Each structure stands twice: as C-alpha cells, then as structure tokens.
Amino acid sequence: MPPGFHLLIAAQFASALADNALLIVTIALLQEQGSPAWWAPLLKFGFTLSYVLLAPFVGPLADAMPKARLMAWMNGVKLLGVAALLLGLAPVLAFTLIGFGAAAYAPAKYGLVTEMVAPQDLVRANCWLEVSVVGAALLGVVLGGLLVSPWLLQQALWVTLAHGLSPGSGLSGSMLALSLVYALASVLNLGIPDSGARYPACASLQPRALLQDFWRANRLLWRDREGGLSLAVTTLFWGVGATLQFAVLRWAADVLGLALDRAALLQAAVAVGVVLGAGIAGRWVPLAAAKQMLVCGVLLGLLIPAVGMSRQLSLTLPLLVLVGLVGGLLVVPLNALLQHRGFCLLSAGRSIAVQGFNENASVLAMLAVYAALLAMDVPIITLMWGWGLAIALAIVGLMARERRRTVKPPSAASSAAAGPGAPGRAA
C-alpha cells in the first residue's frame, strides 16, 4: 500500500467508530426522553438525508481541494453536531447535522483511496477499508453499549459531567467522550499526504449546472455494463444493511428480551463476519472475478429469515456471523469494481458522490418503509422475512439479466479508459 494509506485507514476508523457509538447513545437519549420506538430509524434517516440532498455538490467539492483536509473539516462538522446534542437540540436534527459532515467526508475518503491505489490493488485496498469500517462498527456498537450502560452512567465522573454539561440528560459524559474521538480523527486526517491527483475545474459552480452535471454522471455510470451492475448491488446491499441494523436491535428486544446495551452486541457478530468475508475477498477474489460473487447476495437474503426464526443465542450468533461473512464477500469485490469503473468514466470524487447518492437514497427509502411498518405494529419477524426474500430475489434477477446479455462490442462509455473528467497525475 502507498505511503499514507494506513494513516487514512486509522482516521477513517476513528471517525466511523464515533459515528456508530453515537447512534447507540442517541437511541438511548430518545429512550431517556420517552420518544416512541419508530423515532429510532429516523435518526439514520436524518443522517442519510444529507448524502442524498448534497450528492451533486460534494463530489466537485471533494475534487476541488486536498481530500484529507476536507475530511478533517468534516469531522469538525460532526463535532458541532455533538455540541448541538449537548445543548438540547432535537436528536433527529442534531444527527442530521452529523450526517452533513459524513456526506462530504465519504467522497473524499473513497476518492482518496482510488487516487492513491493502482486498479489491480483496489480489491485489497477495499478489504482494508471495509475491515476498518466494519471494525469501527463492531467496536462502535460495543463502545456505544458501554456508554449507555447503567454501570457507567452511575459512576461519579459521569454524573458530574452530566450535571455540568447538560443537566437534563445523564448521557452528557458519553457524548463528550465521543467528541474527543472525532477530534482525534481530525488530527489523523491532517497527517495524510496529498495524493497528487488534480482535476479540471468545474465549468460552472452554479447549482443548476452542478445538478445537470451530476445527473449526466449518474446516467453514465448506470448505463455502463459493469458500473450499472455493481451500483445496483451496492445500492441494494446498503439499503437492506441499514434497515437490518435496526431490525436486529428490535428483534433482540422483542424475541430475546435483551436490553439495548446487550442487543447492540449482536451487531458485533455481523461485523465479525463482514471482517472475515472482506479478508477472504481481499486475499482470493481478483477484480476480474467480482461478478462471480453475486451468489453471496442470494445466500445473504436467505440467511436473514433464518436469523428471525432463531430463538437461542447459541444459534443466533453463528448465523449473524455467517450473514456478515457472505455480505463481506459480496460487497467488497463489487465495490472495488464500481470504484474502478467510476474512476475511469468520471473522476474519484464525482463517481463516489453518484455512488453515495444511489446507496443512500436506497437507505432512506427502506428506512422510511421500515419505520412506517413499525408504526403499524407489523411483527419484526415478518419484516425480516420480507427483507431477506426481497434481497435474494433482487440478486437472482440481476444474475439472470447478466446471463441473458449477449457479448456485444463495448460502448464508447464503457470502453473509455478515462472520461473527460479523468484526473491527471501530478509529477
């Protein structure tokens, strides 16, 4: 891996660790305030909304300046969101502000990986990145569970911080601890060297022109054979994954009778599996074989109802690890293929912005449906059956479409080694 790559991974890990822990802390804050259960998915909804609304603008922003510097600034925006929570702003609004920072952080992070790493090493680089993301999710839910545990909240230091920072909440010390993690991530970002990649300036910075350019880029990536396939898979995967995160918490409470701090640990089992799957993909799945991993998507969908039918932790934990493993085997190679095609057709920042828009629009749609079904008191096991079978059938449909396609001469878009916006490497 090139110089500075592992520092990028460390900065990403710290920022994602705080994001995941803060979600658990904010869910606990909603419970402390007596909010209804269906408000919890709205936290993720608000967080993700910024990814969709800002997608036409964050790509050019990420390409207009050194990406590591932008990442440091966006961690500062997340710090403002934590401060808003401490000052008593509505949790959903505060988490939406944190999502604004994350929305601009994402194209800079993934774009920098694409700039720093050669195409033949992208699957391995994505393995590192996915392990850091999932490792942060794993430790983030553990840290979040610790930060909302009754034992910690009763400690003298935490009680003192609660009275001093925000007398209305006993979680003030937990939020302060996570603000320090965001600050650490900013410091690590500032140490990442410039990749040297430079892009032509946008013809116009007018919002209308940026929107038109974004939609052209969106159509170009969807119409590309490999780009469209990988984008469809990752869009579906992240939408279902975000919903499953809340479904597992609700299922653990309804079926197993676990409190939030213990239910959060079940997500750690999924994270362990994703790390294993990402490691296997990074070691043995080359970029050329990425499409062969679609079968893992079918297995993933069929495993979700199996988890819903489980009634014992001894069976649930290995099933959740297996869910994570096939998910990692699916998403890491397909994500690398998508990054490669996006970099060839567009530019690092613009292609990641298009990817982020589609994936997070899927997250918003599925979370909205999930929250509505919860408000209608649909049983959680029914929801898990529906979500699991939906992803399995969708992947089967994509596999069937890929088989039906006859071999055709590549189009000008899909054969381009570099589009009009492709970067030039600085000497």
Image: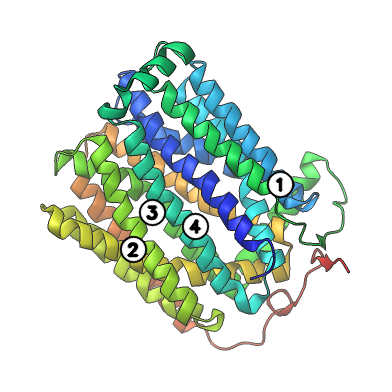
Cα–Cα gap, marks 3 and 1: 34 Å
Q: 412 above or below 106? A: below
Q: Residue at x 47, y 20 (%)?
A: 90
**Residue at mark 1:** 190
Query: Secondary structure beneath disc 4?
Result: helix
Cα–Cα gap, marks 1 and 2: 32 Å
Cα–Cα gap, marks 2 and 4: 13 Å
The numbered mark, 1 or 2, whose residue comes first in the sequence reads 1
Amino acid found under the numbered disc labelled 1 = Leu
Q: Residues within 10 Å of mark 2 (few under 14, many from 20)?
A: many
Count of all numbered marks drawn on residues in the image: 4
Amino acid found under the numbered disc labelled 2 = Gly
The numbered mark, 1 or 4, whose residue comes first in the sequence reads 4
Q: Nearer the viewer, residue 254 or 25?
A: 25
Q: Select label 3 or label 1 by which is in front.
A: 1
Amino acid found under the numbered disc labelled 4 = Ser
**Residue at mark 3:** 240
Cα–Cα gap, marks 3 and 2: 16 Å
The numbered mark, 2 or 4, whose residue comes first in the sequence reads 4
**Residue at mark 2:** 273
Q: Nearer the viewer, residue 300 or 285?
A: 285
The numbered mark, 3 or 4, whose residue comes first in the sequence reads 4
Query: Secondary structure beneath disc 1?
Result: helix
**Residue at mark 4:** 132
Q: Are marks 1 and 4 in contact (CB under 8 Å)?
A: no
Q: Residues within 10 Å of mark 4 (few under 14, many from 20)?
A: many
Amino acid found under the numbered disc labelled 3 = Val
- Seen in the image, is 230 located left or right of residue 427? left
The extreme left residue here reads: 311
Q: Position of residue 290 (x, y in %)?
A: 50, 77
- Seen in the image, is 371 located left or right of residue 57? left
